[in-house]
Each structure stands twice: as C-alpha cells, then as structure tokens.
Amino acid sequence: MKKKEFLNILNEALLGEVSPDIIEQNLEYYSQYIGNDSFREKSVVEELGDPRLIARTIIESERIAKEKGKYTENKYYNNGYENDLNREEKESQGTKQSRSFAFGNIKWYHKFLLILIILALLAILIIIGQVIIRILFVFGLPIILILLLFSMFRRR
C-alpha cells in the first residue's frame, strides 16, 4: 500500500466520526510520519498497519476525551511534534516535573487508608517489640545472671 492510499483509507474511516480539524491533524501527522522517501514509504506504511484500525483508535480516543471533559481538539497530532517540543522546552528550562510520589494527586480516602495502614504497622511493631522484650526478661535475664555467677565461681 502506498502513502496516498493509506491516507485516503484513513480519511474515509474518520469522516463523520470526528471533527474535520481532527481529521486534518491526523492526516498531516501521518503524512509527515510516512515521509516522501519512496524507498521507505512502503515499509513505513506496512509498519503502521491497517489505517482503519488507526482510525478506530483515534475515534475511540476522542470519544473518551469528550466523556472525561478533557476535549482539547487533539493537540497530540499538531504538526506531529508539539508534545515533544513542549517537553524539551520544559526540560531545558529546568522545569522538568518530578516523577516522584506526590500526595497532592491522591484522593482523601486513599490518604486516610494509607494512614490507617501505617498506624496498623506501627501497632504491630510495638506489640512485637514488647513480646521480644518480655522474652528477653523471662529467659535472657536469668541466663545472664547464671553466666555471671558461673564466671565468678569459676575464678575461685
């Protein structure tokens, strides 16, 4: 399959399913992705797979984005590079977001559950510590006293 045929099938599969802007953005993105090199064109198109499946993915992504209220006219495909450029700019400016664990992204009930788990673990550790100390006093103290007495009588 050639680039033109791939783009036509993708266009037909998207028509009536998503907005014309989304269709245009995706066609432009895949056109740039495939490129104009006739030697690579066929292998890139084969690598991409069925354009109908790609169209289904785009349609489903747009539907989910609309349902979640995060519809942003699909910025993911703007010139095919917008996300990469924005990420590179942020990293170069030293504003790279930390990927560490942040409590700001956790819902209140998750925080509450985490606190309960930590308190339960602390309670278990305290109980285990008390048991170990009792065992040491019950068995360890007499053994230490016997060893001290034995060492005292051994010297005489």
Image (cartoon, rainbow, N blue to C red):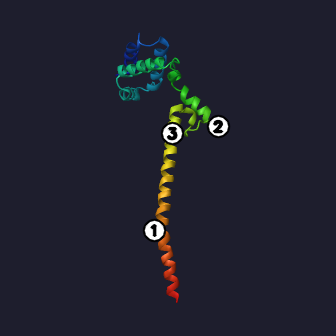
Q: Earlier in the sequence, mark 3 or mark 2?
A: 2
Residue count near mark 1 (Cα–Cα under 10 Å), binned few <14, some 14–19, many ≥20: few
Give the residue at mark 1.
139
Q: Nearer the viewer, residue 98 or 55?
A: 98
Q: Position of residue 56 (x, y in %)?
A: 38, 19
Q: Secondary structure at mark 1?
A: helix
Above or below, comparing residue 108 to residue 8 in the picture = below
> Mark 2 is on which residue type?
Gly
Q: Nearer the viewer, mark 1 or mark 3?
A: 1
Give the residue at mark 3.
114
Taking the spot 40% from the left edge, 29% from the top edge, the residue there is 40
> Mark 1 is on which residue type?
Phe
Q: Nearer the viewer, residue 62 or 82?
A: 62
Q: Position of residue 130 (x, y in %)?
A: 50, 57
Q: Nearer the viewer, mark 3 or mark 2?
A: 3
Residue count near mark 3 (Cα–Cα under 10 Å), binned few <14, some 14–19, many ≥20: few
**What whole-number distance in Å separates the C-alpha atoms at marks 3 and 2?**
32 Å
Q: Position of residue 49 (x, y in %)?
A: 35, 26
**What whole-number distance in Å separates the C-alpha atoms at marks 2 and 1?**
60 Å
User: What number is the disc on residue 94?
Assistant: 2
